[in-house]
Image (cartoon, rainbow, N blue to C red):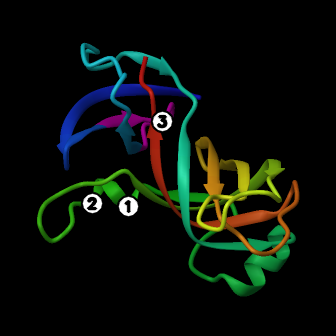
């Protein structure tokens, strides 16, 4: 995934990176400790972006999603973490809905560990979502929810 680096900002005990998608959508991503902290504004980065899912819902098709969800399109992404919270802090969160392009299931995952790794194609972003989900998820399903994004920026 090609993203444009803009700057780092403090986030708890670490950093988040303000990035932009190729069409200019701002996005915050938690920068793993090994990330390159010397990047300058405008640097193009080819990254594999990961997300930890929360409040995940799964739909068999865009039609099923559209029948139940009236606020967002089946392929949409809101970089909610770019809007400061009440304490003024930004975060690496997004609200999304997108198509499951690839699905890996681990039936032996521990009770508190994600049992799915899903490649999500959403509006102007593709990322690997890790989630604990009790139902079946298949390639082509529409997946929606919130994700906390992270990556190793090199």
How far apart are the alpha carbons under marks 1 and 2? 6 Å
Few, some or many residues within 10 Å of mark 2 (<14, 14–19, 20+): few
Give the answer, above or below, for where 106 lies relative to 102. Answer: below
Residue 150 among magenta residues: no
Few, some or many residues within 10 Å of mark 3 (<14, 14–19, 20+): some
How far apart are the alpha carbons under marks 1 and 3? 15 Å
Instruction: Name which residue lies at 43% across and 43% down.
Output: 25
- Residue holding disc 1: 80
| Quarter of the C terminus within the rendering | top left
SS assignment at label 2: loop
SS assignment at label 3: loop
Left or right? Give the position of 15 relative to 119. left
Q: Where does the magenta region start and end?
A: 17-25
4 vs 37, nearest the viewer = 37
Left or right? Give the position of 108 relative to 32. right
> Which label's residue is closer to the chain start, 1 or 3?
3
Give the answer, above or below, for where 81 lies relative to 152. Answer: below
Give the answer, above or below, for where 97 lies relative to 21. Answer: below
- Residue holding disc 2: 83
> Which label's residue is closer to the chain start, 3 or 2?
3
SS assignment at label 1: helix
Q: Which label was assigned to residue 21? A: 3
Q: Which label was assigned to residue 153? A: none
Instruction: Name which residue lies at 69% across and 49% down.
Output: 120
**CB within 8 Å, label 1 to label 2:** yes
| Quarter of the N terminus within the rendering | top right
């Amino acid at each position: 995934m090609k993203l444009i680096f803009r700057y780092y900002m403090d986030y708890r005990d670490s950093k988040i990176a303000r990035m932009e998608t190729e069409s200019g959508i701002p996005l915050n991503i938690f920068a793993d400790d090994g990330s390159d902290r010397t990047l300058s504004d405008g640097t193009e980065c080819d990254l594999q972006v990961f997300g930890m899912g929360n409040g995940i819902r799964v739909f068999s098709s865009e039609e099923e999603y559209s029948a139940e969800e009236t606020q967002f399109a089946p392929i949409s992404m809101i970089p909610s973490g770019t809007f400061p919270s009440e304490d003024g802090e930004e975060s690496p969160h997004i609200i999304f809905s997108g198509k499951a392009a690839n699905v890996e299931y681990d039936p032996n995952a521990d009770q508190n560990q994600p049992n799915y790794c899903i490649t999500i194609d959403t509006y102007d972003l593709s990322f690997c979502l890790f989630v604990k989900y009790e139902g079946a998820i298949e390639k082509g399903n529409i997946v929606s929810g919130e994700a906390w994004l992270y990556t190793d920026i090199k």
